[in-house]
Amino acid sequence: MSLADGYGNTLTTRSAEARDHYESAVTLFLGANREGLAAFSHCVAADPQFALGHVGLARALMSAGRTSDAKDALKTAESLAFDVTSRERDHIAATGLVFSGQSAKARQAIRAHLSDHPRDVLLAQMCASVFGLIAFSGEAGHEASLLAFTESLLPHYGEDWWMMATHAVSLCETGQIAASEVLMARSLALNPRNANGAHFKSHALYERGETTAGRQYLTTWVQDYDDRGVLHGHLNWHLALWALHDGDEGAMWAILDGSVGPGASKGLPINILTDTVAILHRAEIAGYAVDPRRWTAASEYAAQYFPNPGQSFADLHAAIAHAMSGKGDRLARLAESSSGYAGDLLAPVSLAFGHIARGRWSDALDALVPVLPVAERFGGSRAQRDLVELAYVNVLMKLGLVEEARRTLKTRRPVLSDAPPVSGLT
């Protein structure tokens, strides 16, 4: 008996129950819903020999932060790969490359695989969005590459909510906001409880400067989202950021302390670190007083979860935390490293924020100037990389270069120029 998933891919399982659980799990996982973990568990319980079910379970466990369990699940899948289709075998192998940290090889393998199997959606998902293998490639122009990637897949998916949401964020990150919102609306109409869709819509609202509309939409949407969901903390980061832009300091701190920061968020360490640091430094740039103990806690968290340089997006934020907390030894280690996909940017960024922490504004400017044009290489979204943009504008302000600060914001991030979240720049 030949069974297939919801995307038409043949599955090596004789169990219709396992197939049904797998299909449900894929839908839940693509929507960043925590229930996908249970669905994948039910899938492999129904057929313990279903290799791709174990791969899906590994992916869900990794998203839940259970790294050791995820690796065990993948090992089980690899042990079953001898009697599966070639598509499934390549799917397992590509996932193994990702799990072993061979991102460049994984990216190459997945691209080649998708040329023959464009609807192998869980592999496509690995490369897509602002946290995928393309965004974290360290390459200049990766936003255009991501757009080309999703655009090439779009014709193969029809009216698929995941593909539409994924292409929509590619459009958004390349400045095509109106087209992004049209596609996003179609996606969310098909699956309103798609957390990735809600996330990507939030980015479009941010890029349009719709602070009030963004707060209203996301506050309502997140109420029914499990706080153990992988995007719960990050969606609340968007709310905290909008509260900052709105001048609602009390709400900003309440959201940070209740849903975003260490001890509050149940998300992945990379999100907890980067979201916390971004709020703290952007709050300082906006003129709010930040308790030094917050910076110390952020530095301790970075040291615990990212002790060794290598994940450049996390390293950028770790450098800020270490600099602002006065942890010179930790900052020096980053400055002396070139590890990671954008490792060559670590030294100037570490130096820049070290100077910022000490109020050495001219030195900070010298260090930031070569970073600013290539900050995209750190990965993440435009909204997240605004941390670097605003840090640069803030340095200009500290040097009394007010008109240059205005001009920089107007030309590089015009969406922030009408009501700039920078102290003294109104």
Image (cartoon, helix red, strand yellow):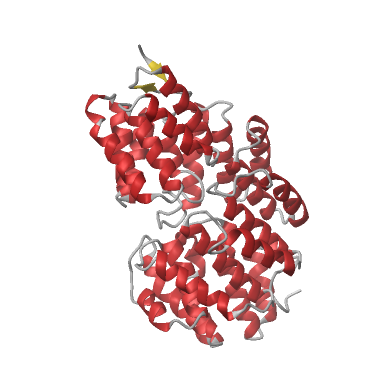
Furthest toward the left, the residue is 82
Residue 278 percent across, percent down from the top left: 57, 66
Q: Return the residue nearer the eye: 65 or 411.
A: 65
103 relative to 23, above or below: below
Q: Quadrant of residue 47?
A: top left
Residue 416 in the image: state x and y as whole percent.
69, 64
| Res 244 visible | yes
* Viewer-closest of 185 and 223: 223
| In-front residue for pair 175/215 | 215
> Is residue 370 in view from this perspective?
no
- For the point 33% across and 34% down, the residue is 91
User: Residue at the spot x=65%, y=72% of the render?
Assistant: 283
Q: Is residue 172 above or below residue 409?
A: above
Name the spot of residue 396 as percent of width and height, x first: 62, 80
Number of marks in the rendered image? 0
Q: Which quadrant holds the N terminus?
A: top left
Residue 183 place in picture, x, y as percent: 64, 36
Q: Residue at x 64, y 65 (%)?
A: 411
Left or right of 143, for residue 410: right
Assign the C terminus to one quadrant of the image: bottom right
Residue positioned most to the top:
1
Who is closer to the viewer here, 278 or 65?
A: 65
| Left or right of 207, for residue 35 | left
